[in-house]
Image (cartoon, rainbow, N blue to C red):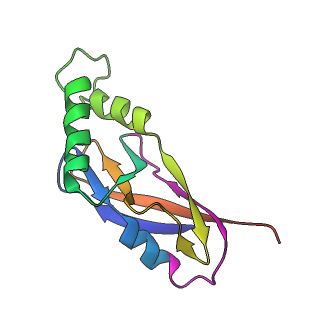
């Protein structure tokens, strides 16, 4: 497993991480298969979406804030229930195709670490799943 450190700067933030992931894979021999990208946090997640236009990530952040407000009447005493709910909707992992050791995504796609309880220092865990010969 490969671990990547990420430092977020806002409470809710979609952080583009594709270049960090590509850099982490660079030293591995070329391979085909899938890359399992996992967030080991209960208030953060991982998603694939459009990276070419930063307004898309901003819109996603706005919708989460509207749908799941921080100031609702939650039972969880720590005050971050909204972050747990948002992370549950995004999910903790993504599986991304890999061809020749490189991420194989669509033209506009990027990989985002989704922070919902920042700012914090976080991790992503990468696990290559190689195709059988």
Residue at (17%, 50%) from the top-left corner?
10
**Residue beneath the point at 41% across and 63% down:** 107
Number of disc labels: 0
Q: From the viewer's perspective, is residue 15 above or below residue 65?
A: below
103 up-or-down from 42: above or below = below
Main SS category, magenta section: loop
Which residue is located at x 20 percent, y 18 percent?
Answer: 72
Looking at the rendering, the stretch of residues picked out in magenta corresponds to 25-42
Rendered location of residue 105, percent (x, y): 49, 62
Q: Is residue 130 magenta?
A: no
Q: Position of residue 1 (x, y in %)?
A: 58, 67
98 lies left or right of 61: right
Q: Is residue 99 above or below residue 44?
A: below
Q: Is residue 106 left or right of residue 96?
A: left
Residue 69 at least partly seen: no
Q: Residue at x 43, y 78 (%)?
A: 23
> Residue 57: horizontal and vertical position, in percent?
25, 48
The image quadrant of residue 78 is top left
**Residue 94 location in percent, x, y?**
51, 51
Q: Nearer the viewer, residue 104 or 132?
A: 104
Check residue 33 for magenta coloring.
yes
Res 133 → quadrant: bottom right
Comparing 75 with 68, the one in front is 68
Residue at the outermost front position = 107
- Residue 100 shows in this picture: yes
Front residue of this view, candidates 16 and 72: 16
Left or right, 34 with respect to 52, comes to right
User: What residue occupies the far right of the structure in this picture?
Assistant: 133
């Amino acid at each position: 497993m490969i671990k990547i450190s990420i430092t977020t700067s806002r409470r809710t933030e979609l952080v583009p991480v594709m270049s960090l992931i590509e850099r982490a894979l660079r030293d591995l021999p070329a391979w085909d298969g899938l890359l399992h990208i996992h967030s080991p946090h209960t208030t953060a997640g991982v998603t694939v979406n459009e990276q070419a236009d930063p307004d898309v990530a901003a819109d996603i952040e706005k919708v989460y804030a509207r749908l799941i407000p921080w100031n609702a009447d939650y039972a969880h005493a720590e005050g971050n229930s909204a972050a747990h709910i948002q992370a549950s909707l995004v999910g903790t992992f993504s599986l991304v195709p890999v061809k020749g050791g490189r991420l194989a995504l669509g033209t506009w796609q990027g990989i985002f670490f989704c922070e919902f309880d920042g700012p914090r220092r976080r991790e992503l865990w990468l696990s290559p799943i190689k195709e059988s010969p």
